[in-house]
Amino acid sequence: MDTDGKFYLGRTIESEKTVLYDPDDLTTHAVVVGMTGSGKTGLCIDLLEEAALNNIPALMIDPKGDITNALLHFPDLLPSDFQPWINPDEARKDDKSIEDAATDTAAFWKKGLAGWDIAPDRIQSLKDAAEFAIYTPGSDAGIPVNILASLKAPEISWDGNSELLRERISGTAIAILGLVGLDDIDPVRSREHILLCNIFETAWKEGNDLNLSELILQTQNPPFEKLGVFDINTFFPEKERFELAMLLNNILASPSFQTWLEGPSLDIANLLYTPDGSPRHSVFYIAHLTDTERMFFVTLLYAAIETWMRAQTGTKGLRALVYFDEIFGYLPPVSNPPSKTLMLRMLKQARAFGVGQVLATQNPVDIDYKALSNAGTWFIGKLQTDRDKERLLDGLQGAAPDLDRRQSDKLISALDKREFLLHNVHDDEAQVFKTRWAMNYLAGPMTRAQIPMLNQLAGVSKSGKLPEKGEVPSRSAKKPTSKSSAEAVLVGTSTRPATPSDIDEYFLPNNLTLSQATKLSEEEIPTDAQSVGLLYRPALLAQAEIRFLQRKYNLDYEQQKTALVLTPERHSTARWEEWIATAVRPNDLDRAPAPKSTFDALDAPLNDGKTLKSLKSDFIDWVYRDTEVAVRSNDILKIYAGPDISQAEFRRMCSEAAQKKRDAEITKTAAQYDRKLDTLEGRLHREERELREDETELSQRKMEEIGKHAENVISLFSGRRRSFSTSLTKRRMTQKAKADVEESVEAIEELEEQVKELEQDLVKAIEEVKNKWSDIVDDVSEIPIQPYKKDILIDLFGVAWMPYHVVKSESGTLELPGYGNK
């Protein structure tokens, strides 16, 4: 069948003329309205089939499971093709076996297709025209979708696109907040919304991607200090930010949410095109999700579509199709869910980029017709109530002011199953037509359990991994800034995890170059190794200033005790003695981390303020128990010295003190001996005086004796008679004088000997004094002194971020400490 590039949708009711729809008309979008059983799903499947046959890629949002039927195309029309998809309940209801029902269905479908001039080769063309796949965000039944990529910085410039990007940020923030249960977000009044939007804008303006982990960390520790004129803690107190971070973390920690982090990302180009540029038809099955999760995903998907769209060149033709099987709740007339802003903007602006939307609903009352006034094509099927019809006509009249309401009312009222009123602003008049037979088997809504079979039927790998996209036809998107392979392996997050509010944090300096770190680590570094950046890992830094003050010992000494615990245990005590480190000078600490570095996670106990306070007390107790200084003591001299006085200085002090005491004792001893010597010398002087007197007397006595003897001799010769008794008396007196002299001489000799002995005793006594004080100088002991607890002052205590050089080679990744002693 040759349709000349048009969509074959059916035949008119009156003339049975073939209805061919120009796909380029879909650049002004289409709305499909019809009650359950109106044939709306069949018409939409027809549209999607024709898009595939015309090499137009499509993204399909399937909230109910009907559009999964787009994968059920069977060119051979064999009963075995249909059998796996036969509803057993329906077969039983018709009193048929599964096999019989499949045979009847195959015959029925073959007959139906033949009645619309559709040959099997056209079904084969449909099967070959596009690559089909079903995605199941939040589930691994189909291909899971990794939503983290939706938080990546868009590849479009902020210049000229700031309004668009801020609107995308707002929608993303609202979707995330909705996922954690915060509904009815007012973008102007909601602190949560304002905070998240500013976090996104700060990151994206710098070209930095975000993920949920980064978002949680930056919620606790925002990368800015003010919002408006208020500082961040005034605008949004830390405790309340922590509560929001906990809500976000609950999502990330939930086992059921892990599937949201698996699978390919929302890379729209990859979802629309194969590597060789062929179209893809990607179905997003969301029937299994909650309303909140659906809104979250739809918002992210539309945001990704819009970002991709903005990177394309303009075109008048239809480049891609976005189909939404039920827009109820996503484009309401009054409320403003996060999806609405994005959908409305797409309705207004997507035409220029060749992106068409087909929006379907069976509820024509609760949709925003003002927004849908931008749609150029309306497919209106059978409606359930007159109220639905009146509401639809009101909206349709807004889109087409020249609409003949009465005629349209009449036509709509007369519609039967599979009959639709086609109102196209590109045509001269509306027409009523009956939809053609769908080439895909319309088996009805599929359950999640059937999705794996559908993907298997379409040839999708069980892993769901898609090949990398190739060049996309007519695509001129800006290439993302490439990151080196080295940068890609740098672990950690670019956002520093927030420490407990009442705990200090420090940044240890990166004072070791890579070569110094390598040398100190003694690691074997592969020759192909290259540095990929700095990673900060948290440690516990504790440093105390200890003062020892003991007046008794003249001790006034200060000491530091430092511990750097690299792997603290998860309780309130630590083996501090195993982590003793060199003292850290506060001025040597960095004020901020090195740029473009990453941070390891902050795990217990470093993220628990209560435990850290207990550890602080334990550190003080350990310092008190384990710290003492030795005071060198000389009790006799009353000389004491602490650790700040060297051994040589202490000995000099003792020597000087001993010398003074020695000299004093020597003086005292000498004085005692001097008194004795004075006594002896006095006696000696007296004896010497007596000796002189005795010698004089002896000399006189001798003279007298000689004189008397001479007189006696003369008397003898002269005949005079003299008395010999007088001579004898003189003789006795001489002898006595001589004896006195001899006695004095002996006394003097004895006294001189005593003086000599006393002088020798003095010398000996002085030597003994010297020896005594010399021994006292060496009489030293040590007195252990412990500090008082009140004299232990905490200088540093908190989380210390320690830098590591991350080195990558083919054999793996190595971390080398960037802080230490050179």
Image (cartoon, rainbow, N blue to C red):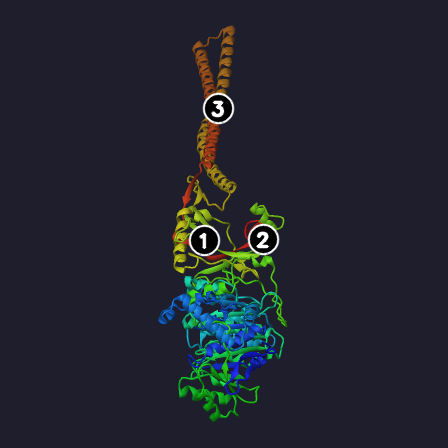
Mark 1 and mark 2 lie on one chain; the one further toward the N terminus is 1
Q: Is residue 187 left or right of residue 475?
A: left
Q: What is the secondary structure assignment of the residue under circle 3?
A: helix
Q: Is residue 25 left or right of residue 91?
A: right
| Mark 1 residue element | strand
Q: Amino acid at mark 1?
A: Ala
Residue 306 makes an appearance in the image:
no
Q: Nearer the viewer, mark 2 or mark 3?
A: 2
Residue that label 1 marks: 544
How far apart marks 1 and 2 lie (CA) works out to: 38 Å
Q: Amino acid at mark 3?
A: Glu
Q: Nearer the viewer, mark 1 or mark 2?
A: 2
Q: Is residue 445 visible?
A: yes
Sooner in the amino-acid sequence: mark 1 or mark 3 = 1
Mark positioned earlier in the residue sequence (2 or 3): 3
Residue 291 sits in quarter: bottom left
